[in-house]
Image (cartoon, grey):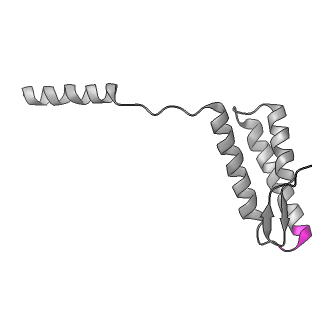
């Protein structure tokens, strides 16, 4: 019986004292979210040869991303607008995805 009590006590000590993962910073989480949108944009648009279809698909994706970002607590209105503008500048040429050209 004492062994069970000792094991339970050790289990509680382990749970209390075990190293905890540090939460991600707001900036780190924002970067991860933006990168996930970039990957999704790339995967959804690559391989589409028809320019009209590509533009329609890109607009639909950007509207969806904007709606999701507006509900996200990590981003304010200005940040959402900047992210959508950045994503809108991504170019897809012949099925190849590239970052926007610097101004």
Q: What residue lies at 71% left-to-right and 36% top-to-bottom?
A: 72
Q: Residue 50 colored magenta?
A: yes
Give the answer, above or below, for where 70 lies relative to 57: above
The percent position of residue 64, horizontal first and vertical second, equals 78, 49
Numbered label tally: 0
Give the answer, above or below, for where 28 lies relative to 93: above
Q: Quadrant of residue 90?
A: bottom right
Viewer-closest of 37 and 68: 37
Q: Residue 27 colored magenta?
A: no
Viewer-closest of 8 and 29: 29
Q: What residue lies at 73% left-to-right and 53% top-to-bottom?
A: 38
The percent position of residue 68, horizontal first and vertical second, equals 74, 43
Direction from residue 67 to residue 14 in the image, left or right: left
The percent position of residue 98, horizontal first and vertical second, equals 80, 61
Write down the region rendered in magenta. 49-53
Q: What residue lies at 80% left-to-right and 55% top-to-bottom?
A: 61
Direction from residue 62 to residue 39 in the image, left or right: left
Q: Quadrant of residue 97?
A: bottom right
Q: What residue lies at 80% left-to-right and 71% top-to-bottom?
A: 95
Q: Residue furthest front?
A: 102
Viewer-closest of 18 and 77: 18
Q: Secondary structure of the magenta portion, mostly?
A: helix
The percent position of residue 92, horizontal first and vertical second, equals 83, 64
Direction from residue 64 to residue 7 in the image, left or right: left
- Quadrant housing the N terminus: top left
């Amino acid at each position: 019986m004492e062994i069970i009590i000792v094991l339970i006590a050790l289990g509680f000590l382990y749970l209390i004292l075990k190293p905890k993962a540090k939460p991600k910073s707001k900036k780190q989480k924002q970067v991860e979210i933006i990168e996930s949108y970039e990957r999704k944009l790339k995967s959804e648009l690559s391989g589409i040869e028809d320019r009209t279809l590509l533009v329609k698909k890109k607009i639909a994706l950007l509207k969806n991303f904007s709606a999701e970002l507006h509900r996200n607590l990590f981003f304010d209105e200005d940040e959402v607008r900047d992210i959508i503008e950045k994503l809108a500048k991504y170019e897809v040429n012949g099925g190849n995805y590239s970052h926007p050209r610097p101004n």
